[in-house]
């Protein structure tokens, strides 16, 4: 189906008349090659998320043994070493990224200042191809175009190809001027002809709200078209680079034949061994540059098949980028330069309160976890408390409820574990967890938004919380501060209307809801019930994105309508007017969290230390199952109705039969 040229085959046959090195040499002319195999290696990363420096940064030391992972300088050295070893064995190496190199760590904030640290460094390291993930759109497609231009595109395509096969910018958009390619064909030094294409997946598109007006074509249909185009060009290997997650990758393979390898991303999954689906090799290397994927492969000229070689070469599929990997000096210098830029930016944004991303802002004797999924977590309580209490201070008004979604909480607080970092939490490590997005001011971080809702609408928010989690998963699970509730997710949806696929909510999933009336954190039993028809106004704080998103539920489901209002009860027509500003600047979520951390109670040595309150959850979101479940109750009711109808029909028939007998 896909073969090398006859000329190359003749050369391989002719090579048989020369002395052949041992198989262990791993060269083109090894015994394995005599059996019509060509070797090559794919190195890969995904979801790098602006992880220029190792993390936890508080533990990192270039001179001492430490548990930190990642960083582009370590990656660069690992890639350089592997390339050198493979070059000596005449084995080609490809380096690929499955997207989301932007967004995540505070280094991504530099993208808003006209810099492109991630992709500039990736170009320098020598990636062969990268794709565009959902987080590349965090600051909008116009800024993405500027970012790519700063990184050297379209000219940079000559060495680092930018692939986006199912991405459809509108006519006239700046993204069309950057040389983004649908497919690419690379002829490797050993003659192997490799075809590449790149996809952004369904879930990734769904969580890229700022991608508009860019649209995205169907993934499977696009893949079929790309495979056909590459086969027409006579490639030997087809590699799909997909920002989709392994579940969607498996679905893609089942729908589209002809893909040999999928380099995956989006779900942050560390696959320590590939998934093999229908002969296709699927891999993914975790997140934040903690690991380098290492796929050693052989292509068989006779069978046109690709096989794995890692077991025979005794090479791991993923290589930890730990302190055993030295830092490549040139890339380390580039990272240092961007770190200086970031420190200056942080100092400006915080008006000098924080000036160094490596500085310790708080101490903690325990981890503050953000797990398990779809449940209240200690870290979510810490963040929402920060939003509520810092907003109270900034607005001068009591905040009754703060709301945040799990999708923007990027991990857990992990205090330092080394002698020089024991119990410490750095600015960088904490900001990494809550630094997504930007505001209308064009600066990093979603701003806090202050609105007012009725008690009835507070109940609706809590119903929406349960409904979103049931329908859309953990990304949309809402965490709260200032209230507590008990609920049953099994009661969220009554049924889904066929044909239009519209869920019908019960608005009965929340069995109890109470507002906290005490001061500070929710560490006392001072609560009042939130009544279902309460029309009193309550102060609610969330972030800019959630404030725009929540009312959409009411647009689809009128029974859950929310009207954002000001303190006088007037509807807010422009959400920008509800942004909390301090000293004329937008107050960001990450600022609230960092300030709240720095203001934690001081220990005996005068250091702010995270309260023991956050060592565990506090009963804000209590899930339980009502027996019998709602759907079982409905089934019983429907069965009872059916029985009554049957009995009624049977009785009517008997009556009619008796009437006929009487008439006869």
Image (cartoon, rainbow, N blue to C red):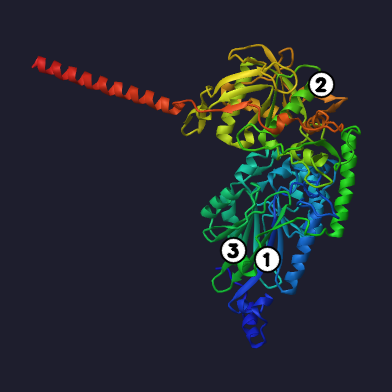
Nearer the viewer's eye, disc 1 or disc 3?
A: 1
Q: Residue at x 67, y 72 (%)?
A: 191
Closest to the camera, between mark 3 and mark 2, is 2
Label 1: how many Cα within 10 Å (few below 14, some 14–19, many 20+) = many
* Pointer 3 residue: 231
Q: CA distance from mark 3 to mark 2?
A: 63 Å
Q: Quadrant of residue 8?
A: bottom right
Of callouts 1 and 3, the N-terminal one:
1
Residue annotated with mark 2: 393
The residue located at (57%, 19%) in the rendering is: 512
First along the sequence among labels 3 and 2: 3
Is residue 524 shown left or right of residue 124? left
Q: Position of residue 375 (x, y in %)?
A: 61, 33
Please say whether residue 521 is visible from this viewpoint: yes
Q: Secondary structure at mark 1?
A: strand
Q: Quadrant of residue 140?
A: top right
Q: Secondary structure at mark 2?
A: helix
Q: Which residue is mark 1?
A: 41
Q: Quick one: which residue is furthest to the bottom in this view?
A: 17
Mark 3 and mark 1 in contact (Cβ < 8 Å)? no
| Quarter of the view holding residue 394 | top right
Q: Is residue 598 above or below residue 273?
A: above
Task: Please provide percent x and percent y for residue 180.
Answer: 72, 52
State how many labels appear: 3
As measured in the structure, the alpha-carbon distance from the residue carrying label 1 to the one carrying label 3 is 21 Å
């Amino acid at each position: 189906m896909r073969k090398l040229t006859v000329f190359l085959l003749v050369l391989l046959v002719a090579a048989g008349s020369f002395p052949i090195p041992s198989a262990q040499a791993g060269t083109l002319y090894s015994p394995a090659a005599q059996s019509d195999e060509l070797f090559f290696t794919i190195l890969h990363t995904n979801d790098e998320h602006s992880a220029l420096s190792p993390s936890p940064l508080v533990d990192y030391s270039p001179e001492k043994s430490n548990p930190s992972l990642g960083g582009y300088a370590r990656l660069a050295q690992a890639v350089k070493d592997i390339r050198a070893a493979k070059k000596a064995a005449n084995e080609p190496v490809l380096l690929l990224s499955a997207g989301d190199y932007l967004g995540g760590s505070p280094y991504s904030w530099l993208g808003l200042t006209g810099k492109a640290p991630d992709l500039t460094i990736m170009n320098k390291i020598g990636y062969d191809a990268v794709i565009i993930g959902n987080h590349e759109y965090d600051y909008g497609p116009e800024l993405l175009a500027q970012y790519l231009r700063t990184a050297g595109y379209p000219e940079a395509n000559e060495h680092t190809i930018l692939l986006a096969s199912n991405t459809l910018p509108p006519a006239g958009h700046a993204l069309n001027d950057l040389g983004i390619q649908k497919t690419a064909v690379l002829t490797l030094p050993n003659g192997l002809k490799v075809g590449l294409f790149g996809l952004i997946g369904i879930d990734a598109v769904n969580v890229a709200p700022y991608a508009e007006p860019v649209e995205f074509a169907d993934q499977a249909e696009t893949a079929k078209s790309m495979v056909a185009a590459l086969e027409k060009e006579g490639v030997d290997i087809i590699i799909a680079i997909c920002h989709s997650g392994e579940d969607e990758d498996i679905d893609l393979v089942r729908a589209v034949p002809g893909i040999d390898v999928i380099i995956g991303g989006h779900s942050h999954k560390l696959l320590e061994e590939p998934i093999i689906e229908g002969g296709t090799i699927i891999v993914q290397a975790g997140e934040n540059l903690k690991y380098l994927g290492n796929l050693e492969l052989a292509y068989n000229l006779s069978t046109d098949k690709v096989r794995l070689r890692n077991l025979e070469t005794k090479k791991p599929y993923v290589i930890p980028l730990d302190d055993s990997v030295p830092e490549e000096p040139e890339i380390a210098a580039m990272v240092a330069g961007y770190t200086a830029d970031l420190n200056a930016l942080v100092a400006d944004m915080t008006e000098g309160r924080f000036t160094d991303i490596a500085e310790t802002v708080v101490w903690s004797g325990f981890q503050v976890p953000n797990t398990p999924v779809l449940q209240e977590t200690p870290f979510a309580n810490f963040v929402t408390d920060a939003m509520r209490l810092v907003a109270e201070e900034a607005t001068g008004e009591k905040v009754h409820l703060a709301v945040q979604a799990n999708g923007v909480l990027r991990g857990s607080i992990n205090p330092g574990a080394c002698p020089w970092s024991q119990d410490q939490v750095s600015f960088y490590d904490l900001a990494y967890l809550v630094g997504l997005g930007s505001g209308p001011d064009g600066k990093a971080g979603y701003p806090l938004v202050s609105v007012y809702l009725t008690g009835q609408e507070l109940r609706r928010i809590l119903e929406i919380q349960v409904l979103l989690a049931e329908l859309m998963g953990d990304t949309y699970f809402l965490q709260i501060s200032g209230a507590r509730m008990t609920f049953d997710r099994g009661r969220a949806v009554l049924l889904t209307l066929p044909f239009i696929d519209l869920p019908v909510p019960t608005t009965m999933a929340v069995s109890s809801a109470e507002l906290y009336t005490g001061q500070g954190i929710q560490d006392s039993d001072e609560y009042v019930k939130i009544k279902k028809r309460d029309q009193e106004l309550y102060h609610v704080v969330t972030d800019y994105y959630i404030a725009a998103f929540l009312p959409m539920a009411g647009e689809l489901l009128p029974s859950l309508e929310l009207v954002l209002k000001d303190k006088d009860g007037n509807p807010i027509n422009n959400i920008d007017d509800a942004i909390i500003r301090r000293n004329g600047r937008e107050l960001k979520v990450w600022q609230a969290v960092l300030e709240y951390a720095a203001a934690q109670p001081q220990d005996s040595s005068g250091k702010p230390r995270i309260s023991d309150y956050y060592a565990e959850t506090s009963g804000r979101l209590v899930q339980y199952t009502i027996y019998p479940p709602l759907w079982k109750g409905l089934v019983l009711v429907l069965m009872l109705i059916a029985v009554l109808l049957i009995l009624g029909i049977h009785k009517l028939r008997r009556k009619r039969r008796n009437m006929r007998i009487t008439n006869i």
